[in-house]
Image (tube, rainbow, N blue to C red):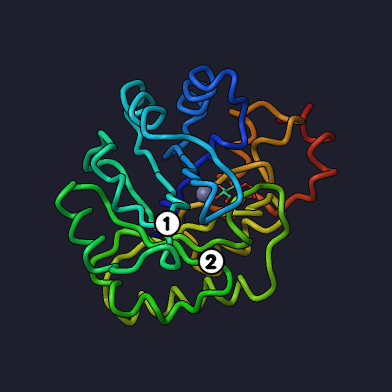
Amino acid sequence: MSRLNKKISPSIMCGDWLNIEKMIYQLEAAKADWIHVDIMDGHYVPNITFGFDMVNQIRRIVDIPLDVHMMVYHPERFFNRFELDQRDIISVHYEAVEHMNQIIHMLKQKKVKIGIALNPGTDVSVLRTYVEDLYMVLLMMNQPGGYGKSMEAGMMDKIRETKTLINKSGKKVLIEVDGSVSYVLAGEMSRAGADIFVAGTSSIFNKTMDLRPSVQKLRRIVNHVEPNYYVHDLTSLKQSV
Ligand code: DX5
Ligand code: ZN
């Protein structure tokens, strides 16, 4: 994927839950490429977030792809509750699934794009069997279930390893990075091979900038048209944006 095709996927769990519709429209106006919707079951991860109705209602008010990240044990139980289409991506966690081939078959039937998510501790080699069927690999940069956590050691190398594995397969599979995707780290994540950047509290939902300039800033950083900034620079930049 050429570097100018890098995509920003804001994680709405990091936004204002009491004004989700307004946030979604602001993100669309800010030219976000996708909307990242974290589904948490309180079992696979110690947190509970949105359900199917939220996803399906968001689907009805936006045109851009929904990037559904299922942090759910046995996610296959719920695929038919989603009213999604070929624009949308459903990523399941490798660690939360028993029969990945069956999952892939079911998602192909639903005509959505397929992603496999890996926790920091899961080796990229597990992807080898499935990479032919994937649209995307979601690499967690920290433990799933929360936000505002630091990136774990070795994650930049993991992005590079994943890129090498994908290149060897000859398939055009995208790499999404999720968790601690900050203005400081996003540039290096991009150079390491990441294509899609989940924007959470580490970047655009930081209360010092409006969504439009903060999405634009992250985009400039991942497209290497702007150097990485340290968060404390943001306040001085607020006036200049
Ligand atoms: C957490 C979610 C992420 C999270 C990112 O499990 O997958 O989308 O919201 O937020 P930050 O950028 O704060 O790590
Ligand atoms: Zn996520």
Q: Does dot 2 land on a helix, a strand or a loop?
A: loop
Q: What kind of residue is marked 1?
A: Tyr
Residue 203's label in the rendered image is: none
- The residue lying at 53 percent from left, 58 percent from top is 177
Residue 29 % position (x, y) = 48, 23
Choose top left, top right, bottom left or bottom right for residue 239.
top right
Q: Is residue 241 left or right of residue 96?
A: right
| Residue 38 drawn above or below residue 130 | above
Residue 230 % position (x, y) = 79, 50
- According to the image, label 1 marks what residue? 73
Choose top left, top right, bottom left or bottom right for residue 127.
bottom left
Q: Earlier in the sequence, mark 1 or mark 2?
A: 1
| Residue 119 drawn above or below residue 146 | below
- The residue lying at 66 percent from left, 54 percent from top is 180
Q: What kind of residue is marked 2?
A: Asn
Circle 1 packing at 10 Å, graded few (<14), some (14-19), many (20+), is many
Give the mark toward the camera: 1 or 2: 1
- According to the image, label 2 marks what residue? 119
- The residue lying at 24 percent from left, 61 percent from top is 104
- The residue lying at 55 percent from left, 69 percent from top is 192
| Residue 3 drawn above or below residue 26 | below
Choose top left, top right, bottom left or bottom right for residue 66.
top left
